[in-house]
């Protein structure tokens, strides 16, 4: 199987008042098997991932390539929320999606092993025996996967509300009351229809059926599943314990170094602080004593 999609999406970040987002998706899912289940088996026998019959016999593979039941060509999504008050938040979700493809399954006309599985082959009745009261089909032809009845478009609006009741000084201590309303307009779209067009073949001739004629299934093309109806969900969240978040650690900025002190030059040539006293110079040495001269003539 191959899944191809192109998605265009957008979003607006929450600014404390409101936020919104949405997307438009075009996709195509085509192949010969959905995977581990077979959702278009109307009797629900293939809803277990360990019981698929797709490859039991080659006859079950005939004409089985086509648009798969989970092929939904268009999907539109739009959602957002409004912080009406500090405690109250209102939200909405819009979902629109095109219907899935169905098939027309019948009994394999030539492969007895595949025919043993009932209406699990991709064949479809082509006519009705008018001589037999418009009841049984005379013959079937290859139908192909994905050419049968389709599901309806799914259109749904969901609304929600949240109310926070503080229980302490921390945001981690609060009671949150929740209310959600799903499918507000109570839409009842058909998600999938029965694809088994016959229930078996006549084994004896009766007034309404000849041997080998295919008996129509009255549930063919009738709803197999619906969109879930409107429903309400109520709940609460209780948070306790913890402590307020610590403020972020900010590195201290070192102050600039102090300016160098003012200096002065003392008379002796030394450098000292401007507010200090210069040293007192030593007293000058005493003058030398006078020399005495002797008497004349001696």
Image (cartoon, rainbow, N blue to C red):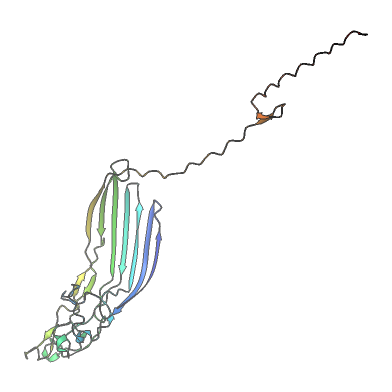
Write the residue at 28% across / 64% down: 156
Q: Residue furthest right?
A: 297
Quarter of the view holding residue 183: bottom left
Q: Position of residue 128 (x, y in %)?
A: 16, 88
In this rendering, the count of numbered labels is 0
Q: Position of residue 44 (x, y in %)?
A: 16, 74
Write the residue at 75% across / 18% down: 285
Q: Position of residue 80 (x, y in %)?
A: 35, 58
Which image quarter holds the N terminus? Answer: bottom left
Judging depth in this view, the residue of 284 and 18 nearest the camera is: 284
**Left or right of 66, for residue 11:** right
**Left or right of 127, for residue 270:** right
Judging depth in this view, the residue of 177 and 152 nearest the camera is: 177
Write the residue at 31% across / 65% down: 95
Which image quarter holds the C terminus? Answer: top right
Q: Position of residue 168 (x, y in %)?
A: 30, 41
Quarter of the view holding residue 5: bottom left
Rendered position, 171 above or below 159: above
Rendered position, 124 above or below 5: below
Write the residue at 22% across / 56% down: 233
């Amino acid at each position: 199987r191959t899944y191809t999609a192109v998605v265009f999406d957008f979003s607006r970040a929450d600014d404390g008042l409101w936020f919104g987002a949405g997307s438009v998706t075009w996709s195509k899912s085509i192949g010969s098997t959905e995977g581990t289940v077979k959702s278009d088996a109307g009797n629900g026998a293939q809803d277990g991932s360990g019981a698929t019959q797709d490859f039991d016999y080659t006859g079950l593979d005939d004409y089985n390539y086509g648009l798969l039941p989970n092929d939904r060509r268009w999907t539109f999504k739009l959602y957002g929320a409004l912080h009406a008050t500090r405690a109250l938040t209102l939200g909405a979700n819009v979902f629109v999606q095109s219907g899935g493809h169905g098939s027309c399954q019948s009994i394999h006309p030539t492969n007895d092993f595949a025919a043993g599985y009932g209406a699990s082959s991709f064949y479809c009745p082509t006519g009705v025996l008018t001589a037999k009261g418009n009841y049984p089909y005379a013959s079937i032809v290859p139908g192909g996967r994905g050419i049968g009845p389709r599901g309806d478009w799914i259109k749904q609006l969901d609304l929600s509300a949240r109310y926070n009741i503080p229980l302490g000084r921390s945001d981690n201590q609060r009671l949150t009351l929740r209310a959600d309303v799903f499918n507000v307009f109570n839409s009842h779209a058909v998600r999938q229809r029965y694809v088994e067009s016959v229930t078996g073949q006549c084994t004896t001739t009766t007034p309404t059926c000849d041997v080998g004629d295919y008996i129509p299934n009255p549930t063919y093309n009738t709803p197999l599943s619906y969109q879930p109806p409107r429903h309400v969900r109520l709940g609460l969240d209780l948070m306790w314990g913890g402590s307020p978040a610590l403020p972020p650690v900010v590195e201290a900025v070192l102050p600039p170094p102090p300016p160098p002190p003012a200096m002065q030059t003392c008379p002796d040539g030394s450098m000292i602080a401007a507010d200090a006293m210069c040293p007192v110079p030593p007293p000058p040495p005493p003058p030398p004593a006078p020399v005495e001269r002797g008497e004349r003539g001696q």
